[in-house]
Image: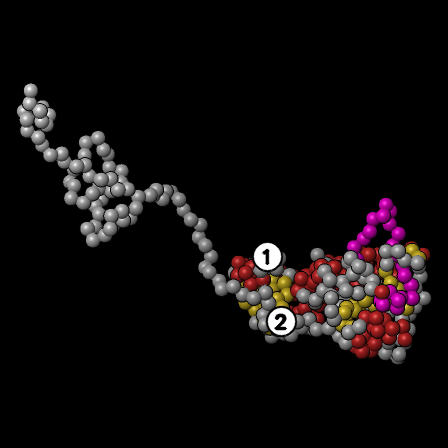
Amino acid sequence: MKSGKPRSPSGGKSFPKKPFPKKSGGWKASGDDETPRGRQPSGAARKFSPDKPSGKPSGKPFGKAPALHARREPEPPPVKPRPAGPAGGDFVYGMNPVERALISGRRSLKALWLKEGRLSPRMEELVRLARQRNLPVSQVAGYELDQRLGHEHHQGVVLVAGPLPALEEQDLWNLTAPQGKAEPGTLVVALDEVEDPQNLGAIARNCAAFGVAALVVGRRHTAPLSPAASKASAGWLEWLPVVQAANLSRFLGEAKKRGFWVVGATGEGDQPLAGFQPPGAVVLVLGNEGRGLRQLVAAQCDFKVAIATRQGASLNVASASALFLHHLAGEPSSVDEPGFESSASPGFLP
């Protein structure tokens, strides 16, 4: 028996085996024209480019084709982001704030923007007021107003204007005590570091409702006279005289020299509001939302009065101001009494 290599079944002849093409990511190897038996190409057969390294196809990779029925909603044209207000000014927004700002004219007015589309009768009235002041009026897309203001609470009306100016202390004395002494029944409200714009606006609205002569705020640690506060006041912040006091404690001392009695609203006052009767002209002082009246401010108060509540509940400063003002000022006999504009009618308020 001869030893050696085993004979092949084909009669001793041996045939070289043809190597199968190497599979690389589902792509067909270069130079192969047929697919080996038992293998199926993964997708359409594509070839490598000879000048590219192996594993990097020359065409686009396979992937799921987008659905033919898918449709994208049209997008509005891009708008460059704008600041929250013009340089050195404000964007006054909302029907009531814009209308009262146009009527009072206390701000420097620049332009009126209205949401494009059909104008309501209220918007037509705003256009009439703007033309009286020679203001440019333009209609702007709603989404552009949203982007410029950063919110959607503008009601389709924006007034480009300067900041709301505040009066000086001497202006208040000229208004309330021209002869050196305040007349009995004169009512002024002073805020001791009320920091929430919503509370500031609500208090200003209450002051307008009960005929307060002026609202006094500090220069620091107080809510700004912003468009947000004006919106919260239903626009009355644009009409009500607002005085900035450099030092509230010194201001109260000066008010007492001019015939005012200083009444401090406190949680635990010396007497309840229900039985309190002011002896003359009054400056009502309302404290901070959390801290109340500061020590030096409380020391200037002639009376410390509290609202009696049940079960230890308390009111926020805006709600308390409404009760105090209703008690101190009483109900007006008419909405057209002196000190109120002709627009101060129930139908004008929202």
Q: Nearer the viewer, residue 51 or 247?
A: 51
Q: Position of residue 323 (x, y in %)?
A: 84, 56
Callout 2, which amino acid? Gly
Looking at this rendering, what residue extends furthest in the top direction? 1
Looking at this rendering, what residue extends furthest in the bottom direction? 179
Q: Is residue 23 visible?
A: yes
Which picture quadrant has residue 296?
Answer: bottom right
**Is 4 left or right of 124, judged from the image as shown?**
left
**Is 1 left or right of 77, judged from the image as shown?**
left
| Magenta segment | 296-318
**Alpha-carbon neighbours of circle 2 within 10 Å: few (<14), some, or many (≥20)?**
some
**Is 234 left or right of 67, judged from the image as shown?**
right
Q: Nearer the viewer, residue 49 or 54?
A: 54
Q: Position of residue 343 (x, y in %)?
A: 73, 65
**Residue topped by disc 2:** 89
- Residue drawn at x 70%, y 66% is 224
- Residue drawn at x 83%, y 73% is 251
Q: Position of residue 244 (x, y in %)?
A: 76, 72
Q: CA distance from mark 2 to mark 1?
A: 20 Å
In the picture, the quarter occupied by the N terminus is top left
- Residue drawn at x 86%, y 60% is 265
Q: Position of residue 316 (x, y in %)?
A: 79, 55
**Alpha-carbon neighbours of circle 1 within 10 Å: few (<14), some, or many (≥20)?**
some
Which picture quadrant has residue 261?
Answer: bottom right
- Residue drawn at x 90%, y 61% is 304
**Residue topped by disc 1:** 152
Q: Is residue 119 visible?
A: no
Callout 1, which amino acid? Glu
- In reply to whether residue 241 is colored magenta, the answer given is no
Which picture quadrant has residue 335?
Answer: bottom right
Is label 2 in a helix, a strand or a loop? loop
**Disc 2 + disc 1, Cβ < 8 Å:** no
